[in-house]
Amino acid sequence: MDKFEVNIGYWDILLLVAVSLQATALSYLHHPKWKALIWTFPVPFTLASLAVGKPIGTTNIMGISFLLIYTHSIRLMYQRLRAPITAAIAIAAVGYCAAGWALAGILPDTDAAFWTASIGIFALGLALYLMTPHRVEPGHRSPLPVWIKLPVIAGVILILVVIKKQLQGFMTFFPMVGVVAAYEARKSLWTMGRQVPVIIMTIVPLLATCRLTQDKFGLGGALFFGWIVFALVLIPFTKKMWSEAEEDDA
């Protein structure tokens, strides 16, 4: 069994600061569509990948499917089972870490495994995108002062930094912002769940770009090219979804 080695480097500190700010900003946005959009930006994935320091592989791709399960399990526990939102988030987060820890060391990191998983998860995201209609949900803005909110968020991220070696690529898609998003968007969990297919269909091309370019340009360069592809895919999806939302709200 691997022992814990707490090594906090430059990218860990940047991850802690940037993701804390991203999650805090999400907390104070009112409209669900803006919360969903801020959640989509892969800042946590990018900095966590640099902090872990390993090439993009199968665990990264599989982490996206865990994000899907995480998001909808919270919605079902909170809305269907009437569990407290904090308990639902905690159960989902612990489940994510436990599953990621268990699978991180046994998933094959071959090209065949990576591309098979990529195609399958992208197809799943597309199917969910087509089948999930827009719903009008209320907005919510955090009433807590920032000096309370920010340290709580930073504490969650610090725990992940400590166990990053055990989670490997799964750590890059742990819902660092999603933990806050689920709590702050508890009145609009359908909207947040509807955003997951968009995350899948934008992140899979990003990961594919990284996989194809990381040997030549290194992880940092590959992530740069991946962000360009991500933006090119996200913009049309966002325009379409917001247009549909405006029509439904009218």
Image (cartoon, rainbow, N blue to C red):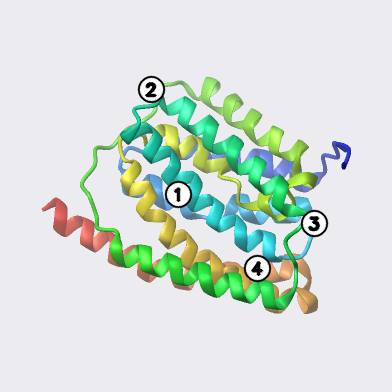
Dot in front, 3 or 1: 3
Q: Sequence-wise, which precedes: disc 3 or disc 1?
A: 1
Crowd tier of the residue under label 2, counting other residues whose Cα lies within 10 Å: few below 14, some 14–19, many 20 or above: few
Rounded to the nearest whole Å, what is the CA distance between mark 1 and mark 4?
19 Å
Which residue does the numbered mark 2 point to in the structure image?
143
Q: Sequence-wise, which precedes: disc 3 or disc 2?
A: 3
Mark 3 residue type = Gly
Rounded to the nearest whole Å, what is the CA distance between mark 4 and mark 3?
15 Å
Instruction: Say whether residue 196 is visible.
Output: yes
Dot in front, 4 or 3: 3
Which residue does the numbered mark 3 point to in the structure image?
53
For residue 224, the mark is 4
Rounded to the nearest whole Å, what is the CA distance between mark 3 and mark 1?
25 Å
Residue drawn where x is 46% and y is 21% of the image = 145
Of residues 139 and 96, the one nearer the viewer is 96
Instruction: Say whether residue 228 is visible.
Output: no
Rendered location of residue 117, percent (x, y): 59, 70
What secondary structure is found at the residue carrying circle 4? helix
Q: Sequence-wise, which precedes: disc 1 or disc 2?
A: 1
For residue 38, the mark is 1
Mark 4 residue type = Phe
User: Image height check: is 185 above or below 111?
Assistant: above
**Are the two marked residues, 3 and 1, in contact with CB atoms closer than 8 angstroms?**
no
Residue drawn where x is 44% and y is 67% of the image = 124
Q: Is residue 27 left or right of residue 133?
A: right
